[in-house]
Every structure is written in structure tokens, then in C-alpha cells.
Image (cartoon, helix red, strand yellow):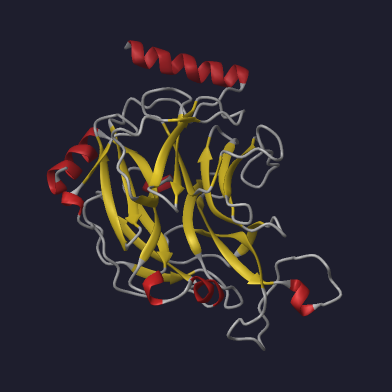
Amino acid sequence: MKVSHLLRAIVVVASTIFGLEISTRADSSLVGYLGVFFLGDAPNIYFYLSNGNNAIFFKALKSGQPILVPTLGTAGVRDPSIINGAGSEAGKKWYIIGTDLNIAKTTWDASQRKGSLSIYVWESTDLINWGTERLIKVENDNAGMVWAPDAIWDSVKGQYLVHWASKFVSQADSNPTLRIDVSYKYSTSDPNHTGNPGPDQIRYAYTSDFKTFTSPQTFINAAPTSIIDLSLLQLGTNSYARFLKNETATNVYMERSDTGLFGTWTRPGGVSAMIHSGVEGPYAYADNLVAGKVNLLLDYYGSDGYRPFTSTNMNANAWVDADRANFPTGLRHGSVIGVTQAEYDALKAKWGT
């Protein structure tokens, strides 16, 4: 048995006995990372490839030109998330989903009241050929928008759980006697959604193919606090970390559950703990080389975009600034996956760096 295989076996055994995290372990089959982002003034999809297995050293593919340019909907995509196929699609399929929003054609207020209720979807069997996008409606007409869609494989359900942020009218508008701000629905008598909007909440639906989705439901409602930009990372069989932006306080924080996606979530470091303020679009990804290490990107939306952070303790609010010397500036809310040697070579051969 090779030493690397022996060490991985020891980690798995120890994890079983002591309940340690195992899915954030290093993966010897992965040799690099593919990053998928949009740029602030260019709502298209851009690919960045890592310099080998350095999780925070990226170079633009295709000489910095967009890989995917949407033509449907608003013809502008934000917050792209690349999703590894799972279940029967593991290693055979990848999806990219994103927000249907071209802010140059609207306003922030209008985009939250009567914004797109659909998400962009591209799919590929090789990370190279992505075909034509499709626009799939996932939210009800009484919602204001669908922002920052992302997905995670739910092994219990055997489907992808797709989640996004949406906004509804304040229930206080419908019942003036209420003195609390609770998310509700825009009335059918208010088709233009002119009512006072309530706080953002996280919604979700299930899909097996990113073509048909179950009816949307509420995943996280923290009213009166607005929350957006959910990112989920599996830590173990039934353990997850989730990262959210508190839109009200404009900071990003982390919560953890060891009882599943719909279990009990607590915030490491205490109920007021946060990672950073003045940031959004958190995206966390496990390190290919260091077992238990997690890389986190935070979008400094009022400054130079994404900056990297790292942690080796997901039971604490213990994030440190990573070396930014080789991390590109100007990247906005996106996502990162690990890639194999064959995938890395194919991406480099197709678009260079």
C-alpha cells in the first residue's frame, strides 16, 4: 500500500471512531482548481485555473475573455456557481447556474421587486463544452427576485438541493397591527410589488436534472434580518458548514450543523460572531492538499472583489488572511471546484492561461 493511501485509510478509520471530519480531507486525485466568476462591469462567466494545486494562485483562461455569454433573460449573469455532478452523474456531469440580472438595464430597487424569478443553467460532460444556456423559473410570482443560486447534493434525498435568496413584502403592510417585520407574500392585488419589501430570506427547491424543480420553500428565514448569498460545504456524513451574508449588518458569518442540512445550526464563536464586515458572496472549498483545511473567498464589493482566507478549524470562527500575491483582483461572487489531471490538462489545452 502506498504511504498516501495508508494515511487516507488512517484518517477514515480515525474519523469513524472519533467522529472527525472526513469530507474536508485532502484528495490525491485532484491536482488543481477551476474558478468560475463574473466581473463587476461584465456580467458574463469567466474561468480561472489554479497554478497546480495552489488553492489561491489563479490565472485567467482564454486570455481573460468570457467563456460563457448569456443571451436569454436580461443577458447578464451574476454569482455563477459550478456544481460537480453527484449520484449517477458523479464525474460525468457539471452544471453552472447563476443569477439572471444585468444591473445596467435596471435598478437595485426594481431588481428586488420585479426581478427575474429564473436561474441560468449550463451543463457539460467535460468542463469544455457547455452548449447553450437555459433559463428555468424556480420561484413563485409573489417573490421579488432570485439571487445567488447555488446547489449541493443531498444524499438523503438523492437529489440536488438548489438554494437562492428572495424577497417578499413585509407582513406588516398587510396587517398594520403587527409590529414585527416578517416575510410574507406580495398580494395578488399588487402585481407590480409596490408594497414595502420585507427582509431577504433563503429559499430552496430540489432537482435531479436542473430542468424540473420542486415547488420553492423557505430554507432560512432570519426576519427581521435580511440574509443572502448562502454557500454550503459538507464536512462529514451529516455535518455541514454554511456561510451567509447578513444584508442588514453587511457582514458574513458561518454556522455549523452536525444533524444534517435541516438540522440544528449554531454559530462557532457565539451568536454575534462574524468573519468580516463589508463583504458578501462567501464561497468555501476544501483544500486538495491539506486535510481539514478550508479555503474561503469573500467579495469586498466596494473595493477589489474577492480576497482569500483559510481555516483549519471549522469548530471555531478562526479565519486568517491568505497570501494575495497571486490571487487576481476584480473577481466577483463565484465558485471553485477541484479538478483531476485529465480535466486540468483539457482546460489548459483548450483555453491556455
Tell which of 52 and 206 is nearer to you: 52
Q: Quadrant of residue 70?
A: bottom left
Farthest residue to the right: give it: 177
Quarter of the image where the N terminus is located: top left
Viewed as shown, does residue 114 lie left or right of 69? Answer: right
Q: Position of residue 255 (x, y in %)?
A: 62, 40
Number of marks in picture:
0
Residue 193 appears in view: yes
Residue 154 appears in view: no
Q: Quadrant of residue 25?
A: top left
Q: Position of residue 191 (x, y in %)?
A: 60, 86
Farthest residue to the bottom: give it: 189
Farthest residue to the front: give it: 303
Q: Residue, x 32% and y 58% (percent of image)? A: 123
Q: Position of residue 87 (x, y in %)?
A: 43, 45
Q: Is residue 247 above or below residue 186?
A: above
Quarter of the image where the C terminus is located: top left
Q: Residue, x 63% and y 41% (percent of image)? A: 260
Q: Position of residue 122 (x, y in %)?
A: 33, 61
Q: Residue, x 51% and y 68% (percent of image)? A: 138
